[in-house]
Amino acid sequence: MENIPIIELKEIRKSFFIGNREIEVLKGINIKIYEKESIAIIGQSGSGKTTLMNIIGCMDRATSGTYLFKGKDITTFNDDELSSFRNESIGFVFQQFHLIPYINALDNVILPTIYSKKNIDNVKQKAISLLTELGMHDRIYNKPTQLSGGQQQRVAIARALINDPEIILADEPTGALDTKTSSEIMDILTSLNEKGKTIIIITHEQEIANRCKKIIRISDGKIV
Amino acid sequence: MLRSIKINLLLVIKNLHTHKIRTLLSILGIAFGTISLVVVSNITEMMKKKVAIEAEKYGKNLVIVSAGTSLTPGRGRTIFLPAKTLKESDAKEVKLSIPNVMDVSPSFSKSFPLRYKESRVTANAIGISKNYNQLRNIKIYLGRYFIDSEFDNNEKKVILGYKIYENLFGKEDPLGKYVLLFRAPLEVVGVLEPMGVDLTGNDQDNQILIPYSTMIRRILNVDYITTFYVQVSDSKFLNQSKEEITKLLRIRHKIQKGQRDDFFVRAITDLVSIKDEATTLVNDLGNTASILSFSIGGLGILAIMMMTVAERKREIGIRRACGATKKDIILQFLLEALFLTISGSILGIFVASLVTLIISHYALYPLAFSVMSIFISIILSFCLGIFAGLYPAKKASDVDPIKALYEV
């Protein structure tokens, strides 16, 4: 079992049309990610790293190539299957936090569970304990606008964890935060990895990438 | 699914809570539609109930025969030609020769000025037969009904309608006092309870009752009557009796084939159905108004939903990233539209009930609620919610989550 990667990308290509011109953003990406790894995908803006993350997170489809998840080909999944895959297996953390503004921290954390097929007992209790673990016990009922950037990102991480996904996929998780808060968020992500989560972080900052065990560098749509 | 609906609904409420004014405005159309539908239906119900009560009050199983010809040359227009051809003997003959007729009661009514000291009123004076109080429901407020000898001896006695009594006497005790009908003094023996307008449109509080013989022999000296009431043994004979009375009177009045009747015969049930017809018209108008209001309300919800989808593209992206399928997104916005229309409807039902209570209180209508209209307005608002929510919800589900999440 150990040598089956949790994610395996084979010859992933992605191109977009701008007008009549076809632009290839990913030019044959091959990656193997094993369980409990922490991986940084680093690259400059325009290198294709966000497109790659969207493909890994099943928000987007590759133009060609194969995506194996635990050895299973999910390239052929339809929209509903991909949605349910995202729901169960992937927890997203975004640069802009992306919390729903009109509901409080607790409801934001609970959000993914309403799309879950699994019956999770005591969702509310679980959300509260996740928020507490992340040091948010006194901000549970605050709305996102009442929270600092670092606090919002903690809520977003709790939301990513609520359905117990195998993978945490973080896109520039510290991009909107100051140095001190960035380091706190990275502490949280690395400690999650130590507890057994597979962590994939997309970044353009070397210091952030250095906190991960493995670094994949991407440039002009290729791994270098 | 059920849990998802429940949580989604909670989120919908939280979202709408942040836009209170907008939400309230958007549901007003539906609320007004519901109000006009429910209020008008309630009024219709109340009017029908009132008519039923009036019919009950009027008297049991009555056919009313009136002198004169009633012409209806156009819709809603009635021309009345009075006649002096209806006689007391006609009434007696009806009682004698038509089966199922229990009793008849001839009467004569005419408007008269009435005076007591310095107070003057115009009253509808009705000369009534002994059995009038058995055919028509009358209730005595003060004093008594006429005794037989007063009928037999053409005595100048009078029973006053309530308003007449109030206007002439105020707080004074009227019993034993004399009122002047023209120059004829009449002794007051009783006052009627306030009874309001009866089914034929007579204000019973503005009438005075006089013994029949006194009226036609001593006051007017005429040999005809204006009306007689016929009581049949059972309501199922009403129509049959009407026909038989008409046939008999045509023969007695020597009316040739093709000539018009010089009298008209109505059963109490005819009066009820005429009144009910009028309420139906009111009801139709109300329904038209409410359909208009519902359509405008539906368009309002549609507009609000389009706006909210455009505003919340990022939220849609977040939900999709968290695992929402397109169907989940459709469900979410449909629920939101449904919540809006149904709360509009519930608000409308609440206000309509309040309005109904107020109308019933001030217009003195018996309270009645049209459960059907409440049911219909909820169903209607549900359909409108689906109609107004479906297109925006489809739009929402087609939002590209990547664009929604990365566009600032």
Image (cartoon, coloured by chain):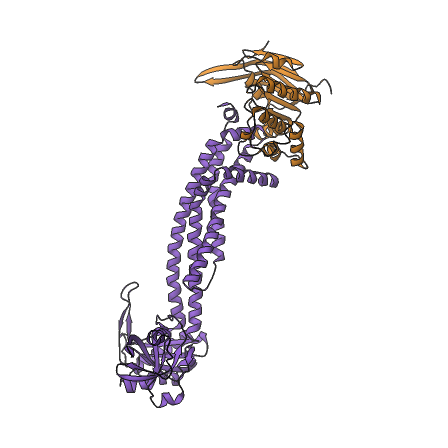
- Residue A139: x and y, percent? 61, 31
With respect to residue B137, does A29 lie above or below? above
Judge by depth and name the residue closer to the eye, A80 or B354: B354
**Quarter of the figure with the N terminus of chain B:** top right
Q: Is residue B209 left or right of residue B38?
A: left
Residue A192 quadrant: top right
With respect to residue B280, does B313 lie above or below? above
| Residue at 29%, 87% in the rendered image | B217
With respect to residue B265, does A12 lie above or below? above
| Residue at 44%, 58% in the rendered image | B358
- Residue A79: x and y, percent? 56, 29
| Residue at 67%, 35% in the rendered image | A125
Which chain is in orange here? Answer: A
Which chain is in purple here? Answer: B
Taking the image as drawn, is residue A113 in sight? Answer: yes
- Residue B62: x and y, percent? 41, 76
- Residue A92: x and y, percent? 60, 25
Judge by depth and name the residue closer to the eye, B108 or B121: B121
Residue B325 quadrant: top right
How many marks do you count on the picture?
Answer: 0
Q: Is residue B318 left or right of residue B132?
A: right
Residue at the right extreme?
A: A1
